[in-house]
Image (cartoon, rainbow, N blue to C red):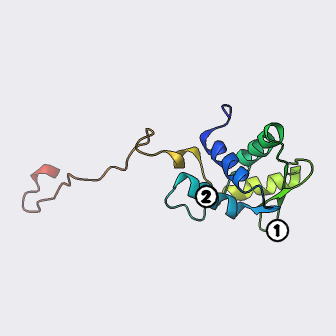
Amino acid sequence: MNELTPIQKEIVTALEQLKEKSLITEAVLAKKVRENTKIQGKNKAGISLKDLEVCVEYLAQNNQLTFALHLNSANDILIKKEEAWKLLDGDAKKRRQSSEKSISVLTNGDLRTKSSGGKAPKKRSDRKKVDFRNLDDFD
């Protein structure tokens, strides 16, 4: 799994854990990724089509797990266990990519923690107070 990004590795792990199911929805897969990585928040986040396609292809070549990607009318990705792996066709792929612009997806940045080099949120500690009696500072 060295050619995969960290989020793609997590997606592959989640797909391997869910391999007993014949149909995996994008929401179930994203929930499993959030559970495995202990991501707080982003409960409505989905999975990027670009990352998912790489993972399906990787699993088909290395683990003999074959999934086919489908898109429902709400542009949600459905992952079905089938005999041969298959990615989305051109029209469905364009529809999904245009809908990803308006939804939140899980990214490599979501996996960063304090221990892995991510930046901790800074708190504002030094607030400047304006003294209205002394307005010479603003001249």
Q: Is residue 139 visible?
A: no
Q: Residue at x 67, y 36 (%)?
A: 4
Q: Is residue 135 visible?
A: yes
Secondary element at tag 1: loop
Quadrant position of residue 135: bottom left
Image location of residue 124, percent across then percent down:
27, 53
Q: Residue at x 74, y 44 (%)?
A: 55
Quadrant position of residue 103: bottom right
- The residue pinned by badge 1 equals 73
Q: Residue at x 7, y 57 (%)?
A: 134
Contact check, label 1 and label 2, Cβ < 8 Å = no
Quadrant position of residue 105: bottom right
**Figure check: 85 above or below 1:** below
Left or right: where does residue 129 sit relative to residue 26?
A: left
Secondary element at tag 2: loop
- Local crowd size for mark 1, using a 10 Å CA cut-off: few (<14), some (14–19), many (≥20): few
Which quadrant: the N terminus? Answer: top right
The three-letter amino acid code for the residue at tag 2 is Ser
Q: CA distance from mark 1 to mark 2?
A: 18 Å
Image location of residue 68, percent across then percent down:
86, 53
- The residue pinned by badge 2 equals 104
